[in-house]
Structures are given as C-alpha cells and as structure tokens.
Image (tube, coloured by chain):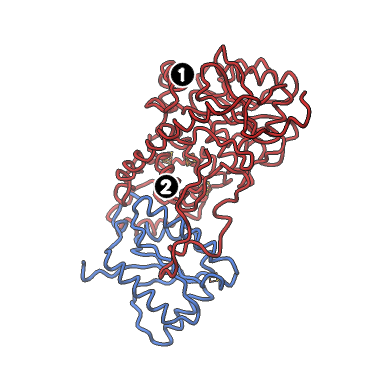
Chain colours: A blue, B red
Amino acid sequence: MDKDFKPNIVGFLCNWCSYAGADLAGSNKLEIKPFLSVVKVMCSSRVNSNLVLTSFLWGADGVLIAGCHPGDCHYEKGNYYARRRFALLKKIMESLNLEPQRLQLSWVSASEGKRYAEVVNKFAEDITKIGPSPFRKNQNL
Amino acid sequence: MTATENIKIEKPPKGASIPAKEGIKKAILGVFKKALETEALDAIMIPVKVPETESYAWVLLKDTTLLENADPLPPVMTIQGGKVLSDLTKHGKINKNIAAVLRPCETRAAVELFKLKQLHFENITLISIDCPGAIPLSEYLAEPEKSKKSFDNVLDKWDGDDAVRKVCQICYRFSLPTLTNAPASDLHIGLSGNTKDDVLLIPVTPKGEKILERLDLKADSSLQKWETKIKEIKKIKSQRRKKFNHDFKANISGPEKFTAVFDGCINCHNCQSVCPICYCQQCYFDSATTKLSSEDYFRRAKERGALRFPLDTILFHLGRMSHMALSCVSCGACEDACPMSISVSQVFSLVGEQTQQAFNYTPGINREESLALQDYLEDEFCEVETPSECEPTNSNEVKENV
Ligand code: SF4
Ligand code: SF4
Ligand code: SF4
Ligand code: FES
C-alpha cells in the first residue's frame, strides 16, 4: 500500500438529507477524512450513469452516492429509482470486473452527522486500501 | 370459416401442421400467399432479396408476385426486424391488417420497443419463427454462395454451428415460449424437429388464432415432438453459452482488458444506430453534453502523458450499456455493423445476461411486463446499500418459460 496515496473520491450528496447530514457532521466538528469532493444534487435520482462513469474514467478512485433513507426521499420515489439505476451500474461493473468496490451507495439522513462521518471515513479507508484507479493513467479511453 | 367456439386454444396447446414437401420456406410462403389472396391480411412485412445484390431488405408487400423473392428466414440479419416494425408504427397504429415475420431476437426487440412506447401492436400480427442463427454479414457478403450453403446446413442441424455468428451459436432463445398468458408473438412458426415434413403454426394470441381461422387451418397437431426437440437444443446451447461466457469474461474483463477490447474502436456509433433498443432520436453520446473544451482535453492529456482520439469511446460503450443492457436481446446487429470487427455484441450480451439476471428480467418475452428501470419495489436490492442492513431479497433465479 502506497503510504502517500490520497484517494480522490467524488461524493454525490442529495440536498435534503445527506448534504444536510454532512453539514451537521461539520458543525459537530466530527473528524472526516479530506478525500471527498462533494457534489450537491437535489436528489439521489439526479445522479445518472454518465456522471458516475465520467468521474471514474477521468480519474476518480471512488464514487459515493448518498441520499435519504428509502421512504424518506423528498420527492417520494427518487431514491427507489436511484437504487435500481445504482444496482444496474454496479452489476455492469461487476460483470466486467471493473472494480465495483469503488462505487458505493449509502443512505444518510439530515440528522445522521455521525453516520455521515462513519460512511465517508470507512469508504475513504477502503479506497485507500484498494489503491489508485487504473483509469487514472489509461490513455486509451 | 370455423365457428367461433373453436377459436379458443385447446390445452395442451396445439398447432396447425403445414406439409413441407417442397421445403419449409416454400410452405411458409404458401401460407402467406393464401393469406394475401384471401385478404386475411392486407400486407406482409418480410425480408426480400434485393435485386442485383445479395442483400436483403424488409418489404411491406401486398403483391403476391413479390413473395417469390421473399425469405422468412434469410441467411443473414441485415436489418433488425424489431426496428423495422418500430419505424412503421412509431407515430401511431397502422390501420391495415398486416403481419410481420420476425426471428425470436427481433420479436423480443419489438416487444421491448413496445414497452418503450416506440411501437404499436394494433392490427399487427406478429409472427415469430424458430431460428437456427444467422451468418456474419461480412462473411456472407464476401462469399454469398458458400454462406448460403452453410446456412442450409445449419438449418438442417439446428444446434448452432461455427458458421453462424457467435451470439447465435450461444443463443438459447432461438424459439419463443408459446404461453398464451405471457405472449411475445401472436403466432409462432415451429420448425426444429419438423424440418423435414412439416411446419407448425402455433397460435399464441386471439390474433394468431384468427389468422388460422381465416385460412381454414385447424390447430389440431400435437406440439410434443417439437417441444422435445426445442428442449434438447436449448440444453446444448445453454451449456455452450455458459462455458463461452465464462471464458469470454475471463478474456475481456478487468480495466486493462476491457479497454483493450475497444482499442480499435473508431467511435462511428454504428453499433448504436443499428441497435433496436437504442431508439433515442439523438443519442446522448452524440450530444454536445459529452464534449469538453480544448483546455480540458489538454489538461487530461497532460495528466496521463497522452490522450487518444477519438475521445470517450469507453464512456460511450459503458454509458450505452447503462442505458440499454437490461433490454439487450442479444441479436448481434451491433457486431454485424461494426467496421472494426469488435466483439461488441458478445460484450453486450454478456453484460445483458448478468444484469438481467440480477433484475430477474427477461427482455421481450412478455408484453405485459414493465421495464425494469421504470419500476421499483420498496423492499429490494438492500445488498447494494452500504452499510447493508438486510438479507438480499432479489433472487438470482432466471425465469424460464420454454
Ligand atoms: S446491444 Fe447489440 S446485441 Fe444487444 S440489442 Fe443492441 S444490437 Fe442487439
Ligand atoms: S446509447 Fe443511450 S442515449 Fe444513445 S441511443 Fe442508446 S439509449 Fe439512447
Ligand atoms: S461499430 Fe465498432 S467501431 Fe463503431 S463505435 Fe461501435 S464498436 Fe466502435
Ligand atoms: S431527496 Fe434525498 S434521495 Fe431524493
């Protein structure tokens, strides 16, 4: 494991739950590893495959999609659709052995600052263990 | 004309046996000729050999003399029939009573296009036909006579052959279930097991029954012999598919190997434009959304030492998969259209199979089923969440109807 490796993780956080959860974690001064570039989206269902794939192909070592717990989406059904699309993308990566562990879906509510910190820290730890994405240096994309 | 009480399909299902003394194709064309002459049908959509070339085009025909050059099962699949039916009915139902003869993968594409609201089935009698495979288009065009011979040979043997396309060799959906409660086609033409003496016309829906009724054909022959043969071939092909996909996956998967598969890709998007499932008026990957400024590209080139053009080929292939893999019917049209001989349909077929299994979804075998991405259950796929708090609920069992 490369001691100096600092993973580059893209986090798509839904505005109403997970982004607020991140905010809470921040105001509670919880320790969060600084590897996540946060992209605020209105709902987890806003994250389409293109956003995820583009992130990976252009060098992200990990992609986290976080939204409201099932049943709590502010657009009612958004995260149910998001979960299906996520399952499809994950399965595509699995079926081609494209290191599916680099893609994660987590539910974090606005009141779960602690859970947010745990999810992000654990994911950052996992990605650090896996190492840099092989796409980082691939010239044939 | 038979009385209405005879229209109801008897159980176990039966088919009308058509004698095929002069070959199966003649027998089938004979039925169509009669259907046109008696006005049981206003027109038929069928592959017809194009004069002056060896190619086939789909023709919507009424004139029975044109049937002479028609072929219900041509040696190649030049244009995916599902796409053709969509072209015909995309903007509304057709007012004439027409029939279309499609291979199973074409039929399934038509059903997916129907679910995608790109095709209307009203007044269309969809006739599916058992299919032994198709010769790779480029090989056929290079050596048409030789290819026709090997196709006849395949049609005789029925268990797939090196002569047909890879996806055909491992296709275990070369026939269609004739379940009346989950219809894909209206009428199915059963060939395998009956190749020598007769052809079976198996009604699936009331529309299929109606055609037989108009032609004074009685569905009174047992399907048993045909079904047994289908099961046999299906077993062989399923095993072959399993082994092939296992080895193929080992050869093409992983970030390095996967990008290497598409090293030769010239990004022409032929694979997308011929794919029946890719119906979008403008493909997302042709749109300006996916294009960046030259500075961005320069920065990327700098980061990785060099940047290959054309750009975004891998994004295109993975992105296309994420749009349509669940509906991929493994028809091979994309690979036939690829100028660089990339094994694109084999890749899509593999990914299609694995994603479809995860969703317990089989594209195109049931018109009543909803599209996997337009539906959800509140309690499912918990295994994809992190942390995961429940037992996996989605079974990986594949629905099998044949
Ligand atoms: S991806 Fe290829 S094999 Fe799959 S439906 Fe489209 S053309 Fe057919
Ligand atoms: S790749 Fe996607 S956007 Fe392009 S035609 Fe296919 S489904 Fe439509
Ligand atoms: S048809 Fe072949 S060369 Fe053209 S985009 Fe598809 S894979 Fe690439
Ligand atoms: S608003 Fe949070 S997932 Fe939809």
Q: Amino acid at mark 1?
A: Asp
Residue drawn at point x = 46 percent, y = 37 percent: B334
| Marking on residue B160 | none
Q: How many marks?
A: 2
The residue labelled by disc 2 is B351
Q: Amino acid at mark 2?
A: Val
The residue labelled by disc 1 is B152
Q: Is residue B276 above or below residue A58?
A: above
Q: Is residue B286 visible from the viewing direction of this image?
A: no
Q: Position of residue B265 (x, y in %)?
A: 38, 41
> Residues at marks 1 and 2, common chain?
yes
Label 1 resides on the chain identified as B
Is B389 placed left or right of B120 in the picture?
left
Q: Position of residue B54 (x, y in %)?
A: 50, 19
Residue drawn at point x = 40 percent, y = 67 percent: A10
Q: Is residue B73 above or below residue B376?
A: above
